[in-house]
Amino acid sequence: WTDTDGHKWQGIPLWLLVGRVDYSVSHSKDVKAFNDELADKGYQVQVLDALRDFFRHCSKHRDPGLAFHAVLRRLGREYVPYLPVAASGLAKEMPYVCLRVPTGGGKTLLACHATGLAISELLHAERGVVLWLVPSNTILEQTAAALRDPRHHYRRALELSCGGVEVMTIEEAL
């Protein structure tokens, strides 16, 4: 596989690794956690490539709207407006990112890799603090347990992406 900078990568494709690990997991009786059709299309690789480009543009130009539209153009997508988040204390050049991932697209694994991209490509830092938001306590418990387990593929992906990792809940951090 060759990335957008022309670097050649080899080894096991991310989607195949995810498929081997997640294929038996189900979100419900009829919905598998891994989607073969998306994997065959290289979906996760494409998402991470686009996110890497977005962070690099943001870092270089300090304009998330410009970065967003540059990535849309590269992907051959139609124009849609960039919607910044206005919050007290948040600099206008701080990008707002929402990855819309269909069921079985590997949201948690993508988040593990996206964390490292944000730290390296946007912040140019060695370490970062990440606030991981989830929609329910059940998912919080499952995700925290997986990210704490050094044998779990989410933890390994996070460490590969970010280096040393410490996982704690809000209660533990306070």
Image (cartoon, rainbow, N blue to C red):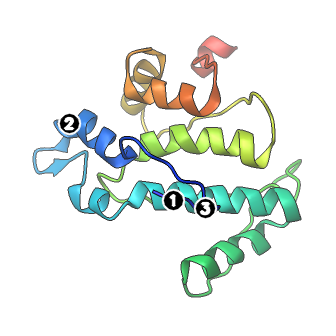
Residue behind mark 2: 25
Mark on residue 6?
A: 3
Amino acid type at circle 3 is: Gly
Location of the C terminus by quadrant is: top right
> Which residue is nearer to you in this view: 69 or 121?
121
Residue 116 shown left or right of residue 128 in the figure: left
Instruction: Point out residue 99 in the picture as x, y percentages from the top left corner.
Output: 52, 58
Return the residue at label 1: 2
**Outermost residue toward the bottom?**
78
**Residue 42 figure quarter:** bottom left
Q: Residue at x 55, y 29 (%)?
A: 160
Q: Is residue 141 above or below residue 82?
A: above
Q: Counting other residues with Cα less than 10 Å from the Cα at mark 1, is it few (<14), some (14-19), or many (20 or more)? A: few
Q: Residue 71 placed where, x, y %? A: 65, 72
Q: Secondary structure at mark 2?
A: loop
Name the kind of residue labelled 2 in the image. Answer: Val
**Distance of mark 1 from mark 2, alpha carbons?**
30 Å
Above/below status of 103 relative to 33: below
Of the two numbered discs 2 and 3 in the rendering, the one whose residue sits closer to the viewer: 3
Separation of residues labelled 2 and 3 (CA atoms): 35 Å
**Residue mark closest to the camera, 1 vs 2:** 1
Q: Residue at x 65, y 61 (%)?
A: 5
Image quadrant assignment for residue 28:
top left
